[in-house]
Image: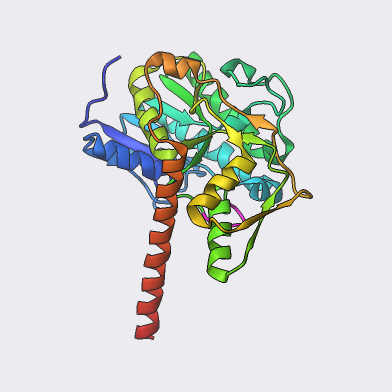
Amino acid sequence: MALLDRDARVYVAGHRGLVGAALVRHLEAEGFTNVLTAARDQVDLRDQSEVSHWFKANRPDYVFLVAGTVGGILANSTRPAEFIYDNLMIHGTVVHSAYESGAKKLLYLGSSCIYPRDATQPITEEELLTGPLEPTNEWYAIAKIAGIKLCQAYRRQYGCDFISAMPTNLYGPGDNFDLDSSHVIPALMRKFHDAKQAGRGEVEVWGTGSAFREFLHVDDLAAACLYLMEHYSDDSHINVGTGVDLSIKELAEMIREVVNPTAELVWDTSKPDGTPRKLLDVTRLRSLGWAPSIELIDGLTSTYQWYLEQIGTQTQLRGVADQSA
């Protein structure tokens, strides 16, 4: 397949999110000169009329659909209506508008939570819809499955070159560090950091630590998305990950070493572990010639450094505001 024209109009839907921001950075670093974005006050991706109008006005050649409402176990369990409604609507409006406006290609980004809770490990693409979902994130998962099927439907009925990629758990600069809605890596970093700042010797972690997870740096995912846009065209979705996992206990200990080495871990076993294990089989992706380049410990270190820089910036801004008050 041919490489994308660096002057093509490339739309990143969800550019302010973790993945979208990384994708914009990567595209610009790769020499793309017409990267299109639209903030929520410009177009509500849940509103078909607004999205259709934007597509007709901007006519993107390529679309990266990475927008969505996301969060961890707590957010999924307390805001199920938002997770299923927002994501269903966003998928529907953008895919339909890409078809209507004649976009050359669209990449839809899903999530590894689409697979059954007890899927055979490592999880191949064929495991989709072979068993019950993990209850703690089924609302989000159902919306993501619908997104895959949506791309397949438009591909089969209209001949659209719409593809789907399913990444594993993500982390990196731009992540959400709010304890009420964050995923496990930023949540643990925040907990260890706050304990260090407060002089507390213990850090509470949800569950037993026995669950296994795979983690991919968001900059690696951004590179994979462009690679797939340029080298993949198929009806089936494709997994994106590292092919390596570790226990939450091991992860917590690794983050402790990066953030707060003297802290003691305290496990709240009344809280759920979620899916026992979730490791993606990335054989198909590797066969295309792509592999990640960022080691987990290096990614954790740079992500924490990014978080410290954000805290420093916010503190400086508050100081300026206090002085001018």
Q: Nearer the viewer, residue 164 or 205?
A: 205
Residue drawn at x 60%, y 57% as measured from the top left: 179
Q: Please state which of residues 115 and 59 is positioned toward the viewer in this rendering.
A: 115
Residue 98, above or below 301:
above
Kindly tell me whether residue 58 is visible in this rendering. Answer: no
Outermost residue toward the front in this view:
262
Q: Which residues are magenta?
A: 177-181
Residue 21: quadrant of the picture: top left
Colouring scheme, one of rainbow, by chain, secondary structure, one colour: rainbow
- The answer to if 250 sits in the magenta stretch is no
Q: Of 256 and 104, which appears nearest the observer?
A: 256
Question: Which residue lies at the image location 57% right of the left edge and 42% below the top edge?
Answer: 251
* Quadrant position of the C terminus in the picture: bottom left
Residue 242 x %, y %: 48, 28
197 vs 290, nearest the viewer: 197
Q: Position of residue 127 (x, y in %)?
A: 64, 18
Q: Residue at x 55, y 25 (%)?
A: 148
Residue 121: tell me if it is visible: yes
178 drawn magenta: yes
For the stretch drawn in magenta, what is the main secondary structure? loop
Task: Name the residue rendered at 60%, 28% in the picture.
Answer: 146
- Where in the figure is residue 191, as x and y percent of width and height? 58, 58
Total number of numbered discs in the rendering = 0
Residue lying farthest to the right in this orientation: 270
Image side of residue 269 versus residue 37, left or right:
right
Q: Quadrant of the N terminus?
A: top left
Name which quarter of the figure residue 227 lies in.
top left
Could you tell whether 300 is left or right of 274 in the image? left
